[in-house]
């Protein structure tokens, strides 16, 4: 996503502020006044001026549904932005909004409206169909001298449905994010932000001239789609729009609840089906009238901008949520992994789900040889093989793609790329306790977010980690170099696979990121007598993973 976002960073100078600190009222030139609220940071009770739900685009309803965003005109009077705004429409376990499409807003948090400070823009993840700004609070990051912006963009079918025509072009959720970044360039000065010093950071689906990519990449499976029309027509059919001659008008006028439910049914059934799950409404369209990606990003690998600086990384067990998702939607598949041949069959299924079918059976064989001991293959006990399966999912879904991003930038700018692996374990309950994982110590996908944004109360050990994370992230946003007390020197990843920083209670510089491709199997393995390895070289496995992503 960074190839798209970088083009929107170098825009205008910040505008003067006439903020009234006691009431947090700010006049945004060309738009109008907004009234926010007062909050405080968690550790030192610094004042936070909070402006939540500022509209940056017109409400995308009626004829604007499925269309690129349109700039919001100014307003009269003072707009009350003191309370959280509505999430963009979605049906999820955590949030359900099936009524209000007026969600193109952003929230700004600052602890000084008069100074000029670096800006951090957070783009939330959620597989392009879930999430919202209200999940991400400023009370940790605003301990640093930065301005935080959290944006919302259209999700699911409203943001990513595509019939590859002007009526439903696709990619409008990405265009929402671009417009929000343009808004930041034009208006962040009145909130104390420096429009010339913007860092975009994001997790999963979300990831300026400076960017932080947290367990997400444009090269991730399912992020891009070459042929979205078939899936979009399936959603249309499920919505009740069966006449191809009027399908665009029908979808535009369909009740929101019907459209969202049709999308959710399509998503679930597609993932359940055999083969690669090409889910419409959750991916960025290659080609088409939006013009964002005329070709797949793999074609631009040798042309990354030379002035870009990135910090990119993953969590140790990033693949656990992917394995969990597949096993929930295809529970019968877990039973196949109880014999040696069943394990091979299950790995084949995983390869298909990640779109890896072009190596004629070679890759899954190498995955077994690289991820499991001989005794684990022979006995095929779930507790022994599940760590390796988590690694396989994480490598294809997240770690391999993130490493591809790192290589793309490092090839043209090796002095400006920082790589990390987050391995700090917390005792908090797992995201899905029902997933049958028999070991303690997992560091799941998005676990690092708990130490950047308040979600649960932290103990002393966790608070120390949160303070370290805030220092590293804000240091990168401020000077382009991640540094913090009690953290060793973090060198740039100027070689093919490192060096990188292992973030834990005691942070360590490591030299060989490929070891992270086997972090789970190595962490939870119990070596028994006669447990000989059938491991081939690590680099062979990883090269196959990276090559297969680009086929």
Image (spheres, rainbow, N blue to C red):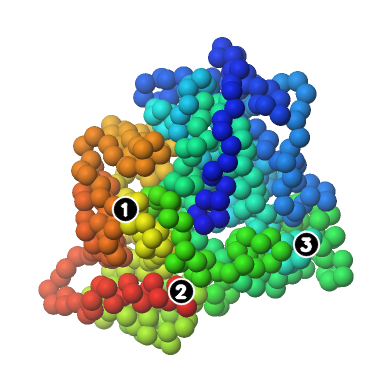
Q: Could you tell whether 73 is left or right of 478 in the image? A: right
Tell me the crowding category of disc 1: few under 14, some 14 to 19, or many 20 or more residues within 10 angstroms, Cα based: some
Q: Could you tell whether 302 is left or right of 37 in the image? A: left
Kindly state the secondary structure of the residue where label 1 is placed. helix
For disc 1, the marked residue is: 415
Q: Are marks 2 and 1 in contact (CB under 8 Å)?
A: no
Any mark on residue 166, and which?
A: 3
Identity of the residue furthest to the bottom in this view: 360
Residue 262 visible, this orientation: yes
* Of pointers 3 and 2, the one earlier in the residue sequence: 3
Any mark on residue 550, and which?
A: 2
Residue 232 is situated, as x and y percent measured from the top left of the image, at: 71, 67
Any mark on residue 113, and which?
A: none
Quarter occupied by residue 408:
bottom left
As drawn, 190 above or below 304: above
Tell me the crowding category of disc 3: few under 14, some 14 to 19, or many 20 or more residues within 10 angstroms, Cα based: some
As drawn, 206 above or below 392: above
Residue 204 is situated, as x and y percent measured from the top left of the image, at: 48, 54
């Amino acid at each position: 996503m960074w190839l798209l976002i970088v083009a929107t960073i170098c825009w205008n100078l910040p505008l003067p502020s006439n903020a009234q600190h006691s009431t947090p009222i700010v006049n945004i030139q060309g738009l109008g006044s907004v009234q926010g609220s007062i909050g405080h940071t968690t550790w030192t009770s610094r004042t936070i001026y909070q402006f939540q739900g500022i509209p940056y685009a017109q409400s995308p309803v009626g004829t604007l549904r499925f269309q690129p965003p349109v700039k919001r005109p100014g307003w009269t009077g003072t707009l009350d932005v003191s309370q959280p705004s509505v999430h963009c429409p979605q049906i999820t376990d955590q949030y359900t909004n099936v009524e209000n499409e007026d969600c193109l807003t952003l929230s700004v948090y600052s602890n000084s409206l008069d100074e000029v400070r670096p800006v951090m823009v957070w783009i939330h993840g959620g597989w392009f169909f879930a999430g919202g700004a209200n999940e991400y609070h400023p009370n940790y990051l605003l301990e640093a001298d930065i301005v935080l912006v959290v944006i919302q963009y259209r999700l699911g079918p409203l943001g990513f449905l595509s019939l590859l025509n002007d009526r439903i072009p696709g990619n409008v959720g990405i265009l929402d994010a671009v417009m929000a970044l343009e808004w930041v360039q034009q208006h962040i000065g009145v909130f104390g932000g420096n429009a010339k010093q913007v860092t975009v950071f994001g997790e999963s689906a979300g990831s300026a001239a400076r960017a932080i990519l947290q367990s997400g990449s444009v090269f991730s499976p399912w992020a891009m789609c070459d042929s979205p029309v078939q899936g979009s027509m399936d959603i249309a059919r499920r919505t009740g729009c069966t006449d191809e001659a009027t399908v665009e008008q029908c979808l535009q006028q369909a009740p929101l609840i019907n459209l969202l439910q049709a999308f959710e049914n399509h998503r679930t059934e597609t993932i359940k089906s055999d083969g690669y799950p090409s889910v419409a409404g959750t991916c960025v369209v290659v080609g088409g009238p939006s013009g964002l990606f005329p070709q797949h990003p793999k074609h631009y690998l040798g042309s990354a901008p030379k002035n870009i600086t990135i910090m990119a990384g993953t969590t140790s067990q990033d693949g656990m949520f992917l394995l969990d998702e597949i096993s929930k939607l295809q529970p019968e598949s877990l039973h196949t992994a109880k014999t040696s041949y069943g394990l091979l069959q299950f790995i084949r299924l995983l390869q298909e789900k990640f779109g890896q079918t072009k190596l004629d059976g070679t890759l899954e064989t190498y995955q077994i040889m690289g991820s499991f001991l001989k005794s684990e293959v022979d006995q095929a006990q779930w507790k022994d093989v599940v760590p390796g399966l988590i690694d396989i999912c994480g490598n294809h879904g997240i770690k391999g793609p993130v490493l591809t991003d790192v290589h793309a930038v490092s090839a043209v700018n090796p002095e400006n790329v920082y790589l990390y692996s987050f391995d700090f374990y917390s005792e908090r309950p797992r995201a899905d306790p029902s997933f049958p994982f028999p070991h303690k110590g997992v560091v799941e996908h998005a676990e690092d977010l708990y130490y950047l944004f308040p979600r649960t109360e932290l103990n002393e050990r966790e608070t120390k980690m949160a303070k370290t994370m805030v220092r590293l992230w804000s240091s990168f946003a401020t000077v382009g170099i991640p540094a913090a007390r009690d953290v060793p020197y973090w060198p740039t990843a100027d070689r093919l696979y490192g060096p990188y920083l292992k973030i834990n209670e005691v942070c360590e510089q490591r030299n060989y990121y490929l070891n992270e491709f086997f972090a789970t199997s190595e962490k939870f393995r119990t070596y028994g007598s006669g447990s000989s390895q059938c491991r081939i070289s690590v680099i062979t496995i990883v090269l196959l993973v990276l090559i297969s992503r680009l086929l």
